[in-house]
Amino acid sequence: MADVAETTLSLMSLEDELTCSICLSTFDCPVTIPCGHNFCQDCLLATWEETQRCPQCRTHIPSKPELKKNTVLSAVVETFNLSSNKTEDSLIKEEKEAEEKEDVIRCDTCMEAEASQTCFTCMASFCEEHLRPHRENPKFAVHQLSDVVGDLSERICPEHNKLMELFCSQHDRPICSLCLQNVLSTHSAILPAGSCTYV
């Protein structure tokens, strides 16, 4: 990423040198006039009749010079345009790869491998390797595993800091077991999370 950024800065400074001061775009068929300045041929011809001066340094040039294409500068502009396009493509590709990486939920233990399941008891997501204790050790048999969940904080009760395992159909929102204890008398329909609506 740093290499692409450095290349982009270099290209930006080079672009200043390859920009016509009349149209403010990179040279198109660049020509050089007697004072040494370069312009697009069409840009210079469009302004020449009015001023007979260099558009950049204002040097008076009494007779219209014979304009010939600056082939070296033209080749540099062509190479620059190709490099700019490649750099833009590289930046777009890197941004796309970064977005794809952000979409992947990583294992909370190794922080590298892609998570394959989330444990609501541990409140963590694990890759296959770090999920092995949950599969092999009987002590983890009571742990509640599910498909990978991105933002576990959405599953935590903000009031009691516990997993919201239940769903209150009266208030149409998920609740935790402590919420259930606090408001059981006022609720007409509390459904276990696994039985009907999972949260």
Image (cartoon, rainbow, N blue to C red):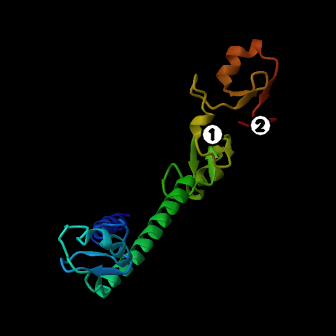
Q: Looking at numbered disc 2 in the image, what kind of residue is underneath it?
A: Gly
State the residue position of label 1: 120
Q: Position of residue 23 (x, y in %)?
A: 37, 66
Mark 2 and mark 1: span between their CA atoms? 13 Å
Q: Position of residue 29 (x, y in %)?
A: 37, 81
Q: How many marks?
A: 2
State the residue position of label 2: 194
| Residue at disc 2, secondary structure | loop
Q: Looking at numbered disc 1 in the image, what kind of residue is underneath it?
A: Phe
Q: Position of residue 73 (x, y in %)?
A: 30, 82
Q: Residue at 66% across / 20% down in the picture?
A: 179
Quarter of the rendering containing residue 46: bottom left
Classed neighbour count for the residue bearing mark 1: other residues with Cα under 10 Å, few (<14), some (14–19), many (≥20): many
| Residue at disc 1, secondary structure | loop
Say whether disc 2 or disc 1 marks the residue closer to the N-terminus: 1
Q: Which mark is residue 141?
A: none
Residue 30 to residue 187: above or below: below
Quadrant where the C terminus sits is top right
Q: Is residue 110 left or right of residue 38?
A: right
Q: Residue at 33% across / 70% down in the picture?
A: 47
Residue 52 to residue 145: above or below: below
Quarter of the rendering containing residue 67: bottom left
Q: Is residue 195 left or right of residue 77?
A: right
Classed neighbour count for the residue bearing mark 2: other residues with Cα under 10 Å, few (<14), some (14–19), many (≥20): few
